[in-house]
Amino acid sequence: SLAQVMWLVGVRPVPDSLGRVNKLELIPLEELGRPRIDVVVSCSGVFRDLFINQMNLLDRAVKMAAEADEPLEKNFVRAHAAEQAEQMGISVRDAATRVFSNAAGSYSANVGLAIENGGWEGEQQLQEQFTSRKGFAFNSDKPGQMDMAQDMFKSSLAKVDCTFQNLDSSEISLTDVSHYFDSDPTKVVAGLRNDGKKPLSMIADTTTANAQVRSLSETVRLDARTKLLNPKFYEGMLNSGYEGTREITKRLRNTMGWSATAGEVDNFIYEDANDVFIADPDMQKRLMESNPNAFRDMIQTFLEANGRGYWDTSEENLDRLRELYQDVEDKIEGVV
């Protein structure tokens, strides 16, 4: 990720005689062969805690690019920073703030927590939560401080054309955990852009030596087919009993998280999941017996996905889900 950001802005790290990297140099435009690309870096709270020196390098790299005396059409970092400096009445260097994270001691946007609990009123709430919690700026000129800079964060996000995340573990994919969609600003950007256009969303799969870049929607489809909808996966989970059923439900909930933050989940994923876990009476029985609480949450997730407009399905399916929900409630409450 560090190398990707520096290559986009056209800055090269320079190691010292011991191999330590604490200096940077601007790659000449002639050598770069393209314009410098502006970036917005949203770091996790854990990254902020562990890699403060790397955040310092990223901030310095962006500011170095913004202060380069180059044509604006060849340097989008400088072009955007100059525009923001004029709008906000600040220096170009301050306007080139592009490295953001949580406030000190705070972690995540809590979007994942809101979706898990189901208590969010609408996507606007999630988007405001993201910008307010992740809108603290790192400034290499003021080391050790994370200052609230929500206006700068929003202003920078409003110019984004493409969102990008790396997958670097074969054990943790897009729907294994809520972290990935919790960090995704796709719909946030669409809400901030003047044209309302949703940015291109890309995922880099670096889990093997043959790294591949795919669209977010393609990656979600791949993830669903290899895990949630894969008989080898869900049968293995069910064979493990109580916790396995909870794991399947969690994966469905995380899939809905991508609908909420990016809108990149195809309708067939919900439809096929419904066919696998809900339409089959034998599967209903297995889920009910292994973990009725998780099964209830699964049914609730399907109904919520439909209610929020993420899943278009038949009234027959919805009626079955409502009846099942009542049946599971009765079992949990001990109603005969």
Image: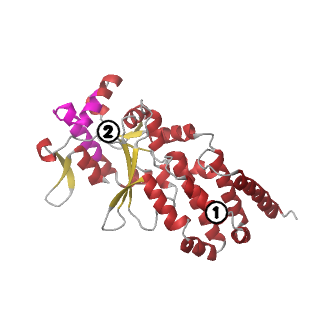
- Magenta-tinted stretch: 58-82
How many discs appear? 2
Q: Where is residue 272 in the image (x, y as percent from the top left)?
A: 59, 61
157 lies above or below 13: above
In the image as oriented, which residue stretches furthest toward the bottom? 239
Crowding around mark 1 (Cα neighbors within 10 Å: few <14, some 14 to 19, many 20+) is some
Q: What element carries label 1?
A: helix
Could you tell me how far apart the alpha carbons at marks 1 and 2 are, in whole angstroms? 55 Å
Which residue carries the number 2 mark?
142
Residue in the image at 47% along x and 35% along y = 191
Q: Position of residue 49 (x, y in %)?
A: 40, 52
Which residue carries the number 1 mark?
275
Amino acid bearing label 2 = Lys
Residue in the image at 42% along x and 31% along y = 195
Task: Locate the N terminus and report the quarter of the image it occupies.
Answer: bottom left
CB under 8 Å between discs 1 and 2: no
Crowding around mark 2 (Cα neighbors within 10 Å: few <14, some 14 to 19, many 20+) is few
Amino acid bearing label 1 = Asp
Residue in the image at 36% along x and 40% along y = 161
Residue 82, quarter of the rendered image: top left
280 lies above or below 139: below
Q: Is the magenta stretch mostly helix, strand or loop?
A: helix
Which one is nearer the viewer's eye here, 267 or 240? Answer: 267
Q: Where is residue 54 in the image (x, y as percent from the top left)?
A: 30, 51
Q: What element carries label 2?
A: loop
In the image as oriented, which residue stretches furthest toward the right? 336
Is residue 144 found left or right of 243 in the rendered image? left
249 lies above or below 156: below
